[in-house]
Image: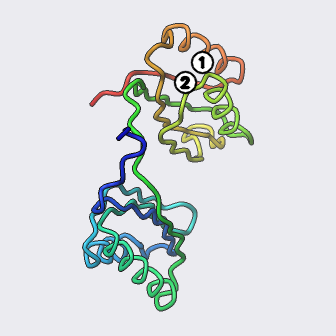
Amino acid sequence: MSESARRPNPNENYLLISAFATHPDSPLLTISRRVADAGCNLVDARLATIGRDVSVIALAMGSWDAVAKLESALARIERDEGMRLVHYRTAPKPLQSNLLPYIVEVIAADRPGIVYELADFFDRQGITIENLQCSRYRAMQTGADMFSAHITIGIPSDMHIAALRDDFLEFCDHLNLDAIMDPMKF
């Protein structure tokens, strides 16, 4: 039987959950408790306070019946606790052993469109953005609105990294972005 035709492991059913609550309430405790109570495992999770809200994005894994139990518990949370939730069944991330993890950091005077310009650059190069965190803040000395981004990218191993780095830094210079691109350190 081919690798792609193989049936999934019955204990590896995945549920992607996005939960939102108003600060200081955090959905983390509620979601992680329901995941454990249902007999599922929390495989991956992210928490961020954005604006006045706290968001949790979580990937739960378990047997088919445990994931079904978790889905029911999430519906009750949304109804009884007023938390905003979105959840659906998904699959694990495919292994991509040919990607080299790199970190990109960008700082610039804030203006509309910076995230789009960065995403467009990497997309045109065939590079995946694995993680992105960006924020706006005031510069301490000048009080100017500033933009900061921390991006994890996956560079195909057959790509010429020195040429990519040169192209990226030239792109950033053209847009007046201070940036670095370095290999991820584990």
Quarter location, residue 64 = bottom left
| Mark before the other along the chain sequence, 1 or 2 | 1
- Give the Cα distance between marks 1 and 2: 9 Å
x and y percentages locating residue 57 in the rendered image:
45, 61
Residue 88 in picture, x, y percent from top left: 50, 66
Q: Residues within 10 Å of mark 1 (few under 14, many from 20)?
A: many
Q: Give the numbered dot on residue 50.
A: none
Residue at 46% across, 88% down: 81
Above or below: residue 106 compared with residue 1: above
Query: How was the colour assigned to the protein in this rendering?
Result: rainbow
Front residue of 84/2: it is 2
Category of crowding for the residue at label 2, using alpha-carbon neighbours closer than 10 angstroms: few (below 14), some (14–19), many (at least 20): some
For disc 2, the marked residue is 179
Image position of 53 with respect to 182: above or below: below
- Looking at the picture, tell me which residue is in the foreground, 109 or 135: 135
Of 102 and 68, the residue lying toward us: 68
What amino acid does circle 2 point to?
Ala
Dot 1 and dot 2 residues touching (CB under 8 Å): yes
What residue appears at the point 38 percent right and 38 percent down from the top-left corner? 2
177 over 72 or under it: above or below? above
Q: Nearer the viewer, mark 1 or mark 2?
A: 1
Secondary structure beneath dot 1 equals helix
Residue highlighted by disc 1: 168
Q: Quadrant where the C terminus lies?
A: top left
Circle 2 — which element?
strand
Residue beneath the point at 29% across and 67% down: 63
Dot 1 amino acid type: Phe
Pick the residue in front: 142 or 175: 175
